[in-house]
Image: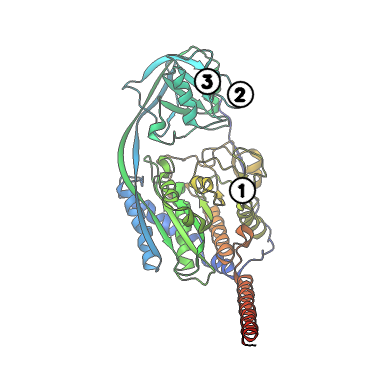
């Protein structure tokens, strides 16, 4: 039985919250960046999509035109702009169908899944026992899955590991069902990782199937794959120290199914408007670098390529990384990445400093805007992944994807309970009508605020001061150098006198 949607009226307007203290640059940027300017970029991305097959996926004309829209505006504003090309495997869905006893069960093929033959494969269903690491170890398949299609609950390890372990045990296909309400829209991460056809289904459908071990099921999952190239757009200010760079990023590509205006036009547009309002020569202590990643939807390819292209010393030059992916979901939730693992969920804390990055965003939204914020785990689903892997502190904002808003969240934020945050996630309907513009404006301000804070000083992240503290430290260092020089001169004179005597 379908769960009825509980609609709650929009949360009451927040009472005037006390202004939070921060550097002048942060306050100036918040005043300059507004939702109307960000929304104009979204209109541009929608029109680019409409003129290019209804999508902006990596390597398509829609992405190229989107990337040039961003790059050209930044070049005109005086930024140092780089287009970084990289190879990846393009994939496009041809078929995704699961049939059980003549009834269709909605399923989503995982990125880089191997394809079934045309018409699919029909085999008995093998239900993998549920525990904290379902389907992750060989022992989970002791009941026998040879020649069968394995039904596995999400959680405990990657989708790639689940299907590879099932394949090693003899399974001919894998179905992963969610461990929370909503569908599974996943990736195997890399073409080489795919061993057997694999797709994702909802928790409810998975639990219903789990009651039918041995049932005959037909799995038809097919995708076209091809080696292609795409490119990232990187822009950097011409002022600020280059050995303590503040970096912000978002992926610019959409899925192949639609225009991707929330996912992730929203984050990309907010970054672009913030960059343009900051300007290429801001009065900032630290340089600011922006990245518009491509092929995120094919396994975080662009951002991973970028981080791995840097030497260790170049990685050290990056003080921190903020990621903005889906910041205007229509049934909005306000989430900040849980940098200090205070929620105790999932992957754990980010590198040292990540907790402070979270706190800066939360303080601004809660104390500056009166908007309560919840933590969200570093699940590895967005472009912060490789930055964290090499030890760079990371944070960012998120307004929810296919997950379902709870009644408590609807009471707190408004919107509809028991409905996904973004009902059009990875679909054709992710268009200009799929945006919460109040959330877009609030989160764009938070992007601007955090940038201004850390372009001024990253002392609470890595001990590198800025502003008056940096100037005072520089003066103290100069004074110490002067005193040391004077002492050396006196010592030399004394020594010379002793020799002369």
* Few, some or many residues within 10 Å of mark 1 (<14, 14–19, 20+): many
- Asked which secondary structure carries label 2, the reply is loop
Instruction: Name above or below for residue 462 compared with residue 375.
Output: below
* Few, some or many residues within 10 Å of mark 2 (<14, 14–19, 20+): few
- How far is disc 2 from disc 1 in space, using C-alphas? 27 Å
Which residue does the image show at 68% across and 58% down from the upper left? Answer: 15
Q: Name the residue under label 2.
A: 131
Q: Which of 351 and 217 is in front in this view?
A: 351
- Asked which secondary structure carries label 1, the reply is loop
Instruction: Name above or below for residue 142 compared with residue 176.
Output: above
Q: Name the residue under label 1.
A: 339
> The N terminus appears in which quarter of the rendering?
top right
Answer left or right for 220 relative to 36.
left
Q: Name the residue under label 3.
A: 138
Instruction: Name above or below for residue 456 compared with residue 248.
Output: below
Residue 1 visible to an observer of this rendering: yes
Q: Which is more N-terminal, label 2 or label 3? A: 2
Instruction: Name above or below for residue 261 compared with residue 276.
Output: above
- How far is disc 1 from disc 3 in space, using C-alphas? 33 Å
Give the label on residue 65, or none. Answer: none
């Amino acid at each position: 039985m379908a769960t009825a949607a509980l609609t709650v009226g929009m949360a009451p307007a927040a009472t005037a919250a006390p202004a939070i203290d921060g550097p002048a640059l942060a306050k100036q940027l918040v005043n300059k960046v507004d939702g109307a300017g960000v929304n104009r970029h979204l209109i541009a991305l929608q029109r680019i999509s409409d003129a290019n097959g209804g999508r902006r996926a990596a390597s398509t004309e829609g992405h190229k035109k989107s990337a040039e829209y961003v790059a050209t505006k930044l070049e005109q504003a005086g930024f140092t702009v780089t287009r970084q090309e990289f190879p990846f495997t393009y994939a496009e869905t041809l078929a995704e169908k699961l049939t059980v006893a003549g009834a269709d069960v909605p399923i989503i093929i995982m990125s880089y899944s191997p394809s079934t033959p045309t018409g699919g494969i029909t085999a008995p269903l093998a239900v993998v026992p549920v525990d904290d690491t379902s389907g992750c170890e060989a022992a989970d398949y002791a009941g026998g899955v040879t020649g069968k299609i394995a039904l596995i609950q999400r959680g405990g390890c990657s989708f790639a590991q689940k299907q590879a372990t099932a394949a090693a045990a003899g399974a001919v296909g894998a179905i992963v069902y969610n461990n929370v309400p909503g569908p599974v829209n996943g990736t195997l991460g890399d073409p080489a990782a795919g061993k057997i056809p694999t797709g994702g289904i909802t928790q409810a459908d998975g639990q219903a199937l789990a009651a039918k071990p041995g049932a005959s099921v037909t799995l038809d999952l097919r995708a076209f794959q091809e080696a292609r190239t795409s490119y990232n757009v990187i822009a950097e200010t011409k002022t600020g120290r280059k050995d303590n760079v503040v970096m912000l990023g978002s992926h610019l590509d959409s899925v192949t199914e639609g225009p991707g205006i929330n996912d992730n036009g929203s984050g990309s547009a907010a970054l672009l408007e913030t960059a343009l309002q900051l300007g290429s020569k801001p009065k900032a202590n630290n340089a600011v670098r922006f990245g518009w990643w491509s092929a995120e939807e094919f396994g975080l390819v662009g951002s991973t390529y970028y981080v791995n292209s840097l030497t260790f010393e170049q990685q050290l030059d990056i003080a921190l990384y903020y990621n903005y992916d889906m910041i205007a979901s229509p049934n909005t939730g306000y989430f900040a990445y849980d940098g200090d693992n205070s929620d105790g969920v999932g992957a754990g804390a980010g590198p040292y400093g990540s907790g402070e990055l979270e706190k800066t965003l939360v303080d601004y939204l809660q104390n500056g805007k009166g908007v309560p914020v919840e933590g969200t785990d570093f699940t590895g689903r967005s472009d912060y992944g490789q930055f964290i892997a090499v030890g760079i502190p990371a944070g960012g904002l998120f307004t929810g994807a296919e997950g379902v808003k709870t009644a408590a969240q609807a009471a707190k934020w408004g919107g509809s309970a028991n409905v996904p945050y973004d009902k059009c996630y990875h679909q054709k309907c992710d268009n200009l009508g799929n945006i919460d513009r109040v959330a877009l404006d609030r989160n764009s301000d938070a992007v601007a605020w955090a940038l201004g804070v850390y372009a001024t000083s990253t002392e609470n992240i890595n001990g590198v001061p800025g502003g008056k503290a940096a100037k005072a430290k520089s003066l103290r260092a100069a004074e110490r150098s002067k005193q040391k020089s004077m002492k050396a001169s006196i010592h030399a004179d004394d020594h010379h006198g002793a020799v002369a005597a």
